[in-house]
Structure formats: C-alpha cells, structure tokens
Image (spheres, grey):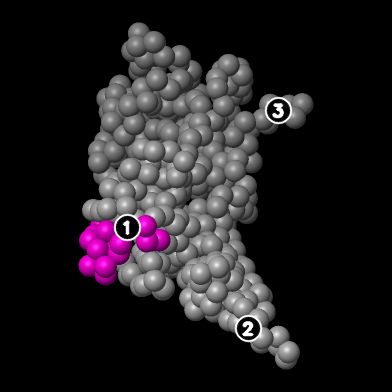
C-alpha cells in the first residue's frame, strides 16, 4: 500500500541520574563524595533508506523512544550512554513539527538528521562538594530527552511530473519512455500510486519522470483520488500537462485543461510559475479540427504544445528531447530549508514541574517541557535571558520557589542552567 503521509511521536532518551555515594576504604577516613554522573540518553535519528518507497511502516507504530542513559554509580563511575534509535524513511521525506508546521528537515540529500536529542546525564554528588558543603547528599537527575510530535510527508523527487485527468495516457507515456511498468487500463483511476521512471538520454544522461495519479476538478479540496498526490507535484522542475485531445471520454479538452490548471494553482500558488508543456494525446482518435483548435487555444496562452500518440511512440521521442533541453536551464529539484520552531509552539506544553530543596540555599527544579524551551535560549544574550525569566514567571515556577522560602542569593538549578535568585 502506498502511504505518503504519517504522524508520529518521537522522544529522545532521558539522561541517567547522578549518583550519591561516598568513598569507603580501609584506613581512609572521610573519603568524600564519589558519585558518578548519569549517562546521556540516546538520540532519535532519521536516516535515508533508498530501498523504501512509502511511509507504510508508520501506519501501525506511532511512538518511538530512544534508550535512556544509565544512572551513575559509586567510585566515580559514570552511567552508560543510551543507544540511539534510527528511523529509516524514503528519500524525499519532509519532517515537520506538528503544532507549528515548521520544517525540521528535508531528507532529500541529508543522510542523517538528529530529530530528538537525548537528555544529558545528571551530575553525581562529587560536583557539589565545596569548602562549606563537604558532604553533599544530593545529585542531579538526568535531563529529559526532547519530545516532538512530527508529521512525515513524502514528496517525490522527480524532474518532470505528468499531470492530467484520469485516462488521458500518462501511464502509457511513462511506460514507453522509461522502464517503468505501471498498470494501464481503459478506465478511471487505473493508477492508484505515483510511478517513477528514468528516461535515458544517452551517454550517461538521464532524468526522472513521475506519473501522478489522475486529478479531477475539486482535487485540491479532497475530491477523488488525486488530492493526496498533489504534494508530489511541488518538487517537479517541469510539468507536462497531458490532455485527451480527442474528447472521447465525453469531456472538452479546453475545459479539462483550465479546470486542472486551476486545481494546481489552488493547491499551491507557486505552481502558476512552474514551467509547463501541454501535450495533446490520443491524436489517432481526434479530428484534425479538434487538434488545431486546442493547439491554438494553448499557444495563445503562452504554452508550448506538442501532439503525441503514446502507444505507438508518435511524437514521444521529440517530447523527451524538448524536456531534456528545458531541464538544462532550470534550477535543481526544490529542497525545503529547515525552519526554527516558534517559541509559541514550544510553550504549548509548558505545564507541570516539581521543586525540591536539596540543601540550604540550593533548589532543584524539574520540568519535562523545559529542555525544548532551553534549546531556543542563548544564555549569553540578555534578551534571551529576559525571555527565560518571563517563561519561569508565567509557568508559576518563581511563585512556587517563593512559597518554599527561597532567599536572595540562593541557587536555582534547572537542568543545564544554574543561577542566583534575585527578587
């Protein structure tokens, strides 16, 4: 089954907790703290697998978690790092954060993408020994791993896209110009999945052509089967709009041409600027007047027009030569640039936290949502620190600290950040 969109939840492994331990050895009095640090949690890593063609593997498994780091132990022994979890996706998969729609990665050329980092391990009590605190009986917990809900969208990587109403001959064309073997039949929606073919132009030159399943009026609003495949047109450098110029299906060629163009533009206005060649197919069943009328209509609107009869290869070689020449002048296949996830999306889950007073003047704050917010904060930047202060105030953390009796100059520890409290 062809599946080209999926939604999953991913979570990096939690960091292991630091250990509270003290050195014990014969003839060594008051050996001091020697608790080791926790291990880092494993990362969630997306990798490209060119043997995959769909996202079908994500239909039944929707949650992916990397291994947690192991806790630290006595004798200054650090915990073992959690194992990374690799998730294989087809080349061309676009990964987006669900709440904001921000593009996290485009797996077109990227071979590996760390989508959810594992949390750092917590410090053991050896880090908290000071001249005035020689017996620290506390350690830091591990930092939670990053957690995201992401959407996966497969957008085919093709140089040329064949678009048109059902049964206009798209599958027939790709079958005669490449080694692709799509299902061909004289009925609507013969093609239920996009088909890719490689067109050889000799001397090691070639380009990829995609047969996009038949689109109909209303496709951009979800009508018919084609609506789920419109996303595959977005990457194509050149479009070939195939029209049944004979009208033997009872439709008017000009009407088909205008309606499908409108659907493409409604789905993505950028497609209005995409280079397009118009092809009249099934000329063996058309009257010369029909061909001439449609050709003139298309050319008057500024499009190049070619007539073909795909099953008998009439005009197909010339058409592929024209495509090849145009591709030499066009920019490469579109790739999506990564975007920053807005702070508003990161703050949607900013609820829930716990505060423990580990020692006099030392408060430990835990909040599973904070590592994602921390990712967008530069502690060297004054405005970022001001924003973090507003986040802590808005989430109720500062109010809870005041209720616990925090005093000016006390230390607040929030995972990787420690600061003095100033009212």
The residue closer to the viewer here, 306 or 125, is: 125
Q: Which element carries disc 2, helix, strand or loop?
A: loop
Q: CA distance from mark 1 to mark 2?
A: 32 Å
Instruction: Point out residue 212 in the picture as x, y percentages from the top left corner.
Output: 45, 39
Q: Which residue is mark 2?
A: 30
Magenta range:
395-411
Choose top left, top right, bottom left or bottom right for residue 325. top right
Q: Which residue is mark 3?
A: 205
Q: Residue at x 32, y 52 (%)?
A: 422
Most extreme residue toward the front is 132
Foreground: disc 3 or disc 1: 1
* Badge 1: residue crowd in 10 Å (few <14, some 14–19, many ≥20): few
Q: Which element carries disc 1, helix, strand or loop?
A: loop
The reply to whether residue 207 is in sight is yes
Q: CA distance from mark 2 to mark 3?
A: 76 Å
255 vs 104, left or right, is left
The residue closer to the viewer here, 138 or 410, is: 410
The residue closer to the viewer here, 7 or 357, is: 357
How many numbered circles are shown? Answer: 3
Residue 310 to residue 229: above or below: above
Q: Which residue is mark 1?
A: 408
Q: Residue at x 28, y 48 (%)?
A: 390
Foreground: disc 2 or disc 3: 2
Q: Residue at x 28, y 27 (%)?
A: 262
Q: CA distance from mark 3 to mark 1?
A: 71 Å
The residue closer to the viewer here, 391 or 174, is: 391
Q: Which element carries disc 3, helix, strand or loop?
A: strand
Residue 56 to residue 207: above or below: below
């Amino acid at each position: 089954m062809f599946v080209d969109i999926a939604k999953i939840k991913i979570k990096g492994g939690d960091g292991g907790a630091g250990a509270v331990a003290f050195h014990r050895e014969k003839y060594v009095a008051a050996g001091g703290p020697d608790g080791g640090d926790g291990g880092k949690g494993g990362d969630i890593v997306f990798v490209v697998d060119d043997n995959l063609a769909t996202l079908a593997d994500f239909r039944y498994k929707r949650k992916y978690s990397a291994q947690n780091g192991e806790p630290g132990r006595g004798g200054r022994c650090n915990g073992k790092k959690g194992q990374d979890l690799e998730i294989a996706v087809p080349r061309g998969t676009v990964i987006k954060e669900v709440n904001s729609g921000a593009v996290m990665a485009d797996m077109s050329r990227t071979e590996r993408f760390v989508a959810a980092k594992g949390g750092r391990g917590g410090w053991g009590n050896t880090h908290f020994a000071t001249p005035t605190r020689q017996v620290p009986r506390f350690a830091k917990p591990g930092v939670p791993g990053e957690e995201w809900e992401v959407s996966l969208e497969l957008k085919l990587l093709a140089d040329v896209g064949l678009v048109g109403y059902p049964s206009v001959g798209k599958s027939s064309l790709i079958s005669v110009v490449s080694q692709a073997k799509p299902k061909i039949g004289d009925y609507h929606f013969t093609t239920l999945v996009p088909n890719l073919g490689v067109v050889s132009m000799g001397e090691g030159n070639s380009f990829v052509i995609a047969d996009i399943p038949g689109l109909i009026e209303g496709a951009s609003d979800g009508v018919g089967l084609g609506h789920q495949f419109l996303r595959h047109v977005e990457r194509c450098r050149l479009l070939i709009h195939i029209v049944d110029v004979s009208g033997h299906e009872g439709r008017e060629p000009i009407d088909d041409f205008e309606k499908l163009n409108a659907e493409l533009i409604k789905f993505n206005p950028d497609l209005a600027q995409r280079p397009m060649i118009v092809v009249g197919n099934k000329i063996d069943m058309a009257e010369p007047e029909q061909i001439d009328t449609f050709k003139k209509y298309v050319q008057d609107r500024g499009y190049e027009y070619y007539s073909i009869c795909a099953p008998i290869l009439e005009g197909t070689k010339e058409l592929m030569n024209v495509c090849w020449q145009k591709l030499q002048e066009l920019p490469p296949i579109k790739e999506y640039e990564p975007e920053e996830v807005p702070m508003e999306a990161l703050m949607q889950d900013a609820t829930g936290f716990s505060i423990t007073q580990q020692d006099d003047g030392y408060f430990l704050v835990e909040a599973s949502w904070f590592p994602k917010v921390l990712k967008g904060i530069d502690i060297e930047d004054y405005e970022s620190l001001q924003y973090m202060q507003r986040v802590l105030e808005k989430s109720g953390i500062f109010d809870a600290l005041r209720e616990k009796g925090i005093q000016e100059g006390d230390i607040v520890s929030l995972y990787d950040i420690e600061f003095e409290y100033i009212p």
